Image (spheres, grey):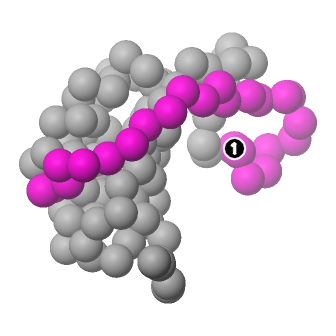
Protein backbone atom coordinates (compact mmCIF):
# COMPACT_ATOMS: atom_id res chain seq x y z
CA UNK A 1 0.00 0.00 0.00
CA UNK A 2 1.15 3.53 -0.83
CA UNK A 3 0.09 7.02 0.17
CA UNK A 4 -0.27 9.08 -3.01
CA UNK A 5 -0.21 12.84 -2.36
CA UNK A 6 -0.80 15.62 -4.88
CA UNK A 7 -0.74 19.38 -4.41
CA UNK A 8 -2.07 21.86 -6.95
CA UNK A 9 -3.85 25.17 -7.33
CA UNK A 10 -7.51 24.97 -6.29
CA UNK A 11 -8.75 25.64 -9.80
CA UNK A 12 -7.05 22.44 -11.01
CA UNK A 13 -8.88 20.15 -8.55
CA UNK A 14 -11.38 18.99 -11.19
CA UNK A 15 -8.58 17.99 -13.56
CA UNK A 16 -6.71 16.18 -10.82
CA UNK A 17 -9.87 14.34 -9.79
CA UNK A 18 -10.11 13.06 -13.38
CA UNK A 19 -6.46 11.98 -13.24
CA UNK A 20 -7.15 10.05 -10.03
CA UNK A 21 -10.07 8.30 -11.77
CA UNK A 22 -7.85 7.41 -14.77
CA UNK A 23 -5.29 6.00 -12.31
CA UNK A 24 -8.00 3.75 -10.82
CA UNK A 25 -8.10 5.78 -7.61
CA UNK A 26 -11.81 6.20 -6.92
CA UNK A 27 -11.64 7.16 -3.25
CA UNK A 28 -9.50 10.07 -2.07
CA UNK A 29 -9.48 12.95 0.37
CA UNK A 30 -8.64 16.61 -0.09
CA UNK A 31 -8.04 19.67 2.01
CA UNK A 32 -7.34 23.33 1.41
CA UNK A 33 -3.80 24.52 1.99
CA UNK A 34 -2.00 27.82 1.62
CA UNK A 35 1.53 27.67 0.32
CA UNK A 36 3.94 30.35 1.53
CA UNK A 37 7.20 31.65 0.16
CA UNK A 38 8.98 33.90 2.61
CA UNK A 39 11.75 35.29 0.40
CA UNK A 40 14.49 33.23 2.05
CA UNK A 41 17.39 32.02 -0.09
CA UNK A 42 16.48 29.05 -2.33
CA UNK A 43 16.22 25.79 -0.52
CA UNK A 44 13.72 22.97 -0.20
CA UNK A 45 10.86 25.16 -1.43
CA UNK A 46 12.82 26.41 -4.44
CA UNK A 47 11.05 24.16 -6.90
CA UNK A 48 7.86 23.59 -4.92
CA UNK A 49 6.21 27.02 -5.14
CA UNK A 50 7.01 29.18 -8.13
CA UNK A 51 8.31 32.70 -7.57
CA UNK A 52 5.81 35.53 -7.43
CA UNK A 53 3.01 36.06 -4.95
CA UNK A 54 3.84 35.15 -1.35
CA UNK A 55 0.70 32.99 -0.86
CA UNK A 56 -0.99 30.40 -3.04
CA UNK A 57 -4.51 29.00 -2.66
CA UNK A 58 -3.90 25.32 -3.13
CA UNK A 59 -5.38 21.96 -2.37
CA UNK A 60 -3.82 18.70 -1.21
CA UNK A 61 -5.37 15.50 -2.51
CA UNK A 62 -4.34 12.14 -1.09
CA UNK A 63 -5.28 8.49 -1.27
CA UNK A 64 -4.13 5.16 0.06
CA UNK A 65 -3.76 2.94 -3.00
CA UNK A 66 -1.69 0.31 -4.75
CA UNK A 67 1.80 0.73 -6.14
CA UNK A 68 0.48 0.25 -9.70
CA UNK A 69 -2.09 3.04 -9.25
CA UNK A 70 0.52 5.45 -7.90
CA UNK A 71 2.87 4.72 -10.81
CA UNK A 72 0.09 5.42 -13.30
CA UNK A 73 -0.93 8.54 -11.36
CA UNK A 74 2.62 9.93 -11.46
CA UNK A 75 2.85 9.27 -15.22
CA UNK A 76 -0.48 11.02 -15.83
CA UNK A 77 0.59 14.04 -13.77
CA UNK A 78 3.90 14.28 -15.65
CA UNK A 79 1.94 14.35 -18.92
CA UNK A 80 -0.54 16.87 -17.48
CA UNK A 81 2.26 19.21 -16.39
CA UNK A 82 3.78 19.15 -19.89
CA UNK A 83 0.54 20.67 -21.24
CA UNK A 84 -0.08 23.01 -18.30
CA UNK A 85 0.17 26.73 -19.08
CA UNK A 86 0.45 27.72 -15.39
CA UNK A 87 3.63 28.69 -13.53
CA UNK A 88 2.45 26.41 -10.72
CA UNK A 89 2.92 22.78 -11.78
CA UNK A 90 1.05 19.98 -10.09
CA UNK A 91 3.27 18.21 -7.56
CA UNK A 92 2.92 14.57 -6.59
CA UNK A 93 4.79 12.12 -4.43
CA UNK A 94 4.39 8.65 -3.03
CA UNK A 95 5.10 7.43 0.49
CA UNK A 96 5.26 3.80 1.54
CA UNK A 97 2.76 2.68 4.16
CA UNK A 98 4.53 0.24 6.45
CA UNK A 99 1.74 -0.52 8.91
CA UNK A 100 -1.95 0.13 9.13
CA UNK A 101 -4.99 -1.07 11.06
Q: Position of residue 86 (x, y in %)?
A: 40, 22
Magenta stretch contains residue 28: yes
Residue located 33% across and 24% down the image:
12
Judging depth in this view, the residue of 10 and 90 nearest the camera is: 10
Q: Is residue 21 magenta?
A: no
The answer to whether residue 68 is seen in the rendering is yes
Which picture quadrant has residue 80?
Answer: top left
Q: Hey, which residue is sitting farthest bottom in the picture?
A: 98
- Please report the bounds of the magenta region as a residue range: 23-46
Residue farthest toward the front in the current orientation of the protein: 101
Asked if residue 78 is positioned above or below residue 15 in the image, the reply reads: below
Q: Which residue is mark 1?
A: 46
How many labels, in total?
1
Q: Residue at 69% x, 44% y: name it.
A: 46
Question: Relative to residue 38, is residue 68 drawn left or right?
Answer: left
Residue 76 in view of the camera? no
Secondary structure under tag 1 reads loop
Q: Residue at x 12, y 56 (%)?
A: 24
Location of residue 96 with respect to 36 vertically, above or below: below
Q: Is residue 62 shown above or below 60?
A: below
Place of residue 1 in the rendered image (x, y in percent of width and height, measured from the top left): 34, 77
Residue found 45% across the figure and 59% down from its top:
93
Q: Main secondary structure of the magenta part?
A: loop
Query: Is 33 positioned to the left or the right of 73 in the image?
Result: right
Say which of 34 and 37 sits in front.
34
Q: Is residue 7 above or below residue 75?
A: above
Amino acid sequence: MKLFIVTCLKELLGDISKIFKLANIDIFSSGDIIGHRDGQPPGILEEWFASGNPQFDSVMIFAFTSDANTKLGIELIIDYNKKLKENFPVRAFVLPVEKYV
